[in-house]
């Protein structure tokens, strides 16, 4: 508990708005507490020194540099991810284009596909469906 207290000054022009006195000397008949949200006249338990403030500033600046570096790393990774996604999309498009069945083959009936395979000398199972026959013909 504080040993001092703020009271309203009797001479604000010369003393300022409040005066700090010992709590034991407070007389409610003579003094009026100064109410600024705290009647405590003591200094805070710990006031940081200049060295502590400078060290804290240096730590904050170092952390800011770390965060900036991390933000740059994330931005670089994002660019790399986008490039890889584009590369994969290009590969998928190329694979799809390479495996596209020509329209004339897709329009052929199962009998026509079997005849074309027989003409090429490609063996096929009798139970093969149209998709299997197209795959054999375009392979």
Image (cartoon, rainbow, N blue to C red):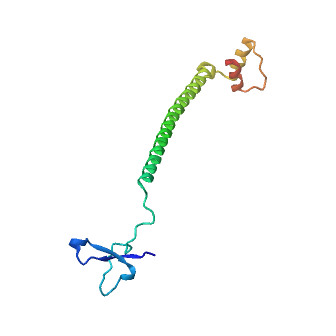
Taking the spot 59% from the left edge, 25% from the top edge, the residue there is 96
Most extreme residue toward the bottom is 29
Q: Determine the image quadrant of residue 40.
A: bottom left
The image shows residue 112 at horizontal and vertical percentages of: 68, 18
In screen coordinates, is 43 left or right of 119? left
Quadrant hosting residue 113 = top right
Q: Nearer the viewer, residue 112 or 87?
A: 87
Q: Position of residue 133 (x, y in %)?
A: 71, 22
Question: Which image quarter: residue 85?
Answer: top right
Quarter of the picture holding the C terminus: top right
Q: How far from the left and from the top, in percent, is residue 91? A: 58, 25
Which residue appears at 69% of the width and 18% of the height?
A: 137
Front residue (pair 15, 116): 15
Left or right: residue 45 versus residue 34 is right
Identify the residue at the far left of this view.
13
89 to 111, vertically: above or below: below
Q: How many marks?
A: 0
Q: Is residue 114 left or right of residue 66?
A: right
Most foreground residue, 67 or 45: 45
Q: Residue at 67% across / 18% down in the picture?
A: 138
Seen from the viewer's position, the closer of residues 54 and 101 is 54
- Could you tell whether 47 is left or right of 89 in the image? left
Name which residue lies at 32% across and 77% down: 7
Please, is residue 123 above or below residue 131 in the view?
Answer: above
């Amino acid at each position: 508990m504080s040993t001092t207290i703020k009271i309203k000054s009797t001479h604000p022009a010369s003393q300022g708005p409040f005066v700090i006195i010992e709590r034991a000397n407070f007389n409610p008949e003579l003094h009026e507490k100064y109410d600024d949200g705290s009647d405590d006249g003591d200094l805070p338990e710990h006031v940081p020194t200049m060295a502590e403030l400078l060290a804290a500033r240096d730590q904050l600046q170092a952390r800011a540099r770390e965060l900036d570096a991390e933000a740059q790393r994330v931005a670089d990774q994002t660019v790399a991810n986008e490039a890889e996604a584009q590369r994969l999309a290009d590969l998928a498009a190329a694979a799809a284009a390479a495996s596209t069945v020509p329209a004339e083959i897709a329009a052929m009936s199962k009998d026509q596909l079997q005849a074309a395979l027989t003409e090429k000398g490609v063996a096929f199972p009798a139970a093969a469906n149209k998709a299997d026959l197209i795959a054999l013909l375009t392979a």
